[in-house]
Image: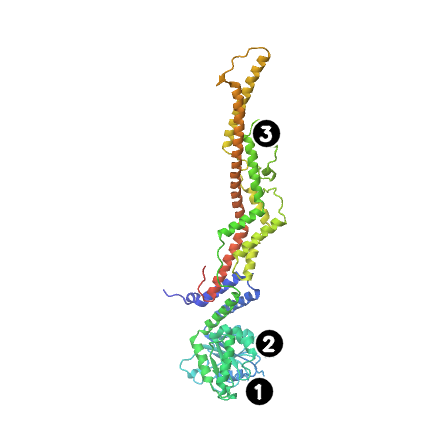
Amino acid sequence: MVKHRDQVQDQSPLTLRLEALNEARELGEGRVQEATLEATLAVLERAAARRSLSAEHTVVGFFGATGSGKSTLFNAVTGENIARSAATRPTTSQPLAGIWGSEGAGPLLDWLDVAERHVLDDPAVGTGGGAASSSSENSAQPTKRGWFRKDPVAPGGLILLDLPDFDSTELKHREIVERLAGMVDVIVWVLDPQKYADATVHHDFMRKFSAHGSVTMVVLNQIDRLDAREVPHVIDSLRGIMADDGLTKVDIYAVSARTGEGVDKLRAAIRSVANERAALSSRLLADVERTSNALAEGATGEKLAKIESVDEQRLARQLAHSSGVDVVVRAVERSYALDAGAKTGWPVTRWMSRLRPDPLRRLNLKSKDVNPIVNRTSLPKAGAAQRAEADGAVREFADRASAGAPDAWRSSIRRAARGSAEILPDRLDQAIASTDLSANKGSWWWPVLSVIQWIALLAAVVGLGWLGVIFGLQYFQIQPPETPMVEGWPVPTLLVAFGVLLGIVIGIAGSVFARFGAKSRARTARKRLQESIRAVAHEYVAAPVSAEIDRYNSFISAVSRARGEKDRRR
């Protein structure tokens, strides 16, 4: 099955890298400098516009400073006197185009905003004479016609642009040059022996496009003004300056537009670029490379690690401490001890334990039929120290999670961690209030000891009653019945002694059991409270931070793919 051409193009490396660049731009919103994002969007929009226009044409722009002989060179290369050149400078105020293959060139030139157009040797115009047709009424008559037609391998669509001087005193000239430098497929820098080292040329223009070496040509024009022995030295000097600009693999063409020396070689290079049909993709790939490098500026390129469970647990412990969990745990322990005493203590005095205030009830944590959505504790409002501790815990968690990220992304991770700072204290309090502390739940041994206590009390009461009856009968001089004896001890006395001693033993055992039970209940309560606090910490701190880390890692992945690199994984 043969794929449709558009389907094939959609899977091209350029398309994939443009998609990755757009993904990185979207992920970087609010995290990367706005100017960088705007520049990225401009590249994407230019790429979309350029790719929707003629792919059969290669647009080559001639850029040069005042006096570089750019227009003269343009005429020499095209073989037509269509660019105005004169001793007075500048002579080019608007871009003009020389066109080979006019079909489909119109919309492309409209997009480039080039109004002055000259169609040269277009097969649609005619054959044999090779005469140029021009859309400009002021076009000069051709002096050398159809230089491309002399080659048996004619190029496809080609558009040569002669542009205003980029160092012109006219601001609009510079604006035109800067705009088209970002739009043409191939950049030709035209320099001259006098100003080839001018800082304006290199710092303001050539250095900015150092990533575009694959679609850059450098022409040293006017070599006829140099002694032949000087040309190699000037070229070596220029090559060194270009190396400082980052243009280390760009060919330098030494030409003289006036005498024609070297022009054929430059023509051949332009012809080769047009024939290969690769300049458009190379230019856009260079734009993507430069923009993705700007997006990744300050980034290590390494993905951040996922949040460790131990870090989340540490955060939960710190938030638990700052939100009063220790107070609640102590209240659970104390409340359990009070309830155990009330249930297993000596029946005669156990009511006294109810007079002691229950700490859990005072914290509003012992009410039945609690609605966890609206219930809140009566814990004291967090003071400055507690708030500082909670803030510090969140900040420390964010700092550990964002270690290794660029400053802008570290800031975004901190913002994600503190995004719920206003409601976090209330959510923590709600988590404590809704945690099942088993506050109204007793232990299995409470009824057992309670029954034994009642049996002991009953034995003591029966023994005392029996002794009371015997004492009364004797008081009224009535002979009481014979009292049963056990090992020489009267049974009533034994009942009293048994009841009292049993009550004491059970009371001591109950207090010991209550102490261990309170500790166990407190441990269970602390574990449940920690789980509740951790759930809140995860939802309002860890999850947003994790989402931001995932976003950063996706950003790094998208930037890597936009740069044509393999995705880094960690």
Judge by depth and name the residue closer to the eye, 137 or 369: 369
Going from N to C along the chain, the mark reached first, 2 or 3, is: 2
Q: Which residue is mark 1?
A: 87
Is residue 368 in view?
no
Is residue 362 in view?
yes
At a point 58% along the width and 13% down the height, the residue shown is: 474
Judge by depth and name the residue closer to the eye, 435 or 343: 343
Q: Position of residue 422 (x, y in %)?
A: 60, 51
Going from N to C along the chain, the mark reached first, 1 or 2, is: 1
Asked which secondary structure carries label 3, the reply is helix
Give the amino acid type for the residue marked by disc 3 in the picture: Trp
Asked which secondary structure carries label 2, the reply is helix
Q: Which residue is mark 2?
A: 172
Quarter of the image with the N terminus in it: bottom left
Q: Residues within 10 Å of mark 1 (few under 14, many from 20)?
A: few
Judge by depth and name the residue closer to the eye, 344 or 11: 344
Q: Which mark is residue 363?
A: none
Q: Is residue 424 above or below residue 169?
A: above
**Front position among marks 1 and 3:** 3
Image-quadrant location for residue 271? bottom left
Q: Which residue is mark 3?
A: 351
Q: Residues within 10 Å of mark 3 (few under 14, many from 20)?
A: some
Q: Position of residue 367 (x, y in %)?
A: 58, 37
Q: How is the image coloured?
A: rainbow
Badge 1 vs badge 2, beta-carbon distance below 8 Å = no
Residue 175 shown left or right of residue 6 in the figure = right
